[in-house]
Image (cartoon, coloured by chain):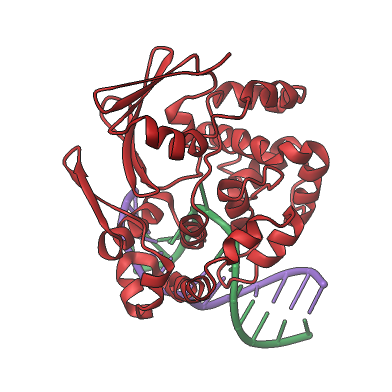
Chain colours: A red, B green, C purple
Amino acid sequence: MKLKITEENNSVIIENIKDFVPKHIFDCGQCFRWNEEEDGSYTGTAYKKTINVKKEGEKIILFNTNIDDFKNIWYDYFDLKKDYTNIKNELSKDNVLEGAIKFGQGIRILNQDEWEILISFIISANNRIPMIKRAIEKLSEKYGVFLEEYRGKKRYSFPTAGTLSKLSEEEIRTCSTGFRAKYILSASKIVSENEKLLYDIKNLCLKDAREELIKFSGVGPKVADCIMLFSMNKSGAFPIDVWVKRVMEHFYVSEGIKLNEIQNYAADKFGDLAGYAQQYLFYYARELGIGRNKK
DNA sequence: CGTCAGGTCTCTA
DNA sequence: TAGAGACCTGAC
């Protein structure tokens, strides 16, 4: 079924859309700059634009935007060209995933900016989501560009590599980044001196891209897979954080198994759909608190 | 007050 | 080459 797109009053209405639930999309761990409003809609900033996303019945409404931005930014950002029904049908052949998908049936994997995601997930290491969000917002407020005031809040772009590369480690630390400040500074210098680098990495195969990303200090296997999955269109990436480890040990593999063995297991079992499987499993594990009481 | 969080780095054997 | 410790920060 083809999407029906209409524009009115500075908003874009999407009809005939399936597999799109804002809560599932924005709350499955892939993004940090989207926040829930009192009416259940979400407001966020990406690619220098701020919009509000609301599900009304079967329609999705994007507020504070227009058709041009929808075509140029949001269509790809929300991965609207992809048929998630097929993906879910395929993954549902596995009993565990069948259940997980029922919880997060409206998940979509966003296509986010590589640079922003690199820094965001460096910040995520050994950190909590509210703290990660706070650090990213502080960086944006201090070193991003003011965009507009929307819904009573000033909105800023995510700072560029060039801007961050000129800061001191201490200045970056004032944004609650902690010991990760030196990694952020290092990555900023590398990327600002080679603007094509992330783009080049994006064009590599999964294995090679992972190898290149791990060369950034502060980027290990988990963060590398997040970057590949959330900003480099590599659906075979399978980031293993504590939740995914717990849910994998609960349902699939024996406890105490090494992370790279879980990685191989997932690659064998889910192949190119591993990243989608990871998102459904992560959301499922966190919503249900699977394995939370175990060590 | 300790503990610990969506890991990674560093230092040892 | 694998395994322990340390690590900013702030909420409990």
Tell which of C5 and A107 is nearer to you: A107
Classify A62 as above or below A200. Answer: above
Q: Position of residue A40 (x, y in %)?
A: 32, 26
Classify A175 as above or below C7. Answer: above
Side of A78 where A60 appears, left or right:
left
Q: Position of residue A9 (x, y in %)?
A: 24, 23
Q: Position of residue A176 (x, y in %)?
A: 34, 65
Q: Position of residue A135 (x, y in %)?
A: 35, 60
Picture quadrant where residue A271 is located? top right
The residue located at (58%, 54%) in the rendering is A227
Position of the N terminus of chain A by quadrant: top right
Picture quadrant where residue A146 is located? bottom left
The residue located at (27%, 33%) in the rendering is A64
The residue located at (37%, 50%) in the rendering is A130
The residue located at (37%, 55%) in the rendering is A131
* Total number of numbered discs in the rendering: 0
Classify A269 as above or below A136. Answer: above
Tell which of A271 and A258 is nearer to you: A271
The residue furthest left is: A152
Side of A248 where A171 appears, left or right:
left
Side of A58 where A86 appears, left or right:
right
Tell which of A278 and A144 is nearer to you: A144
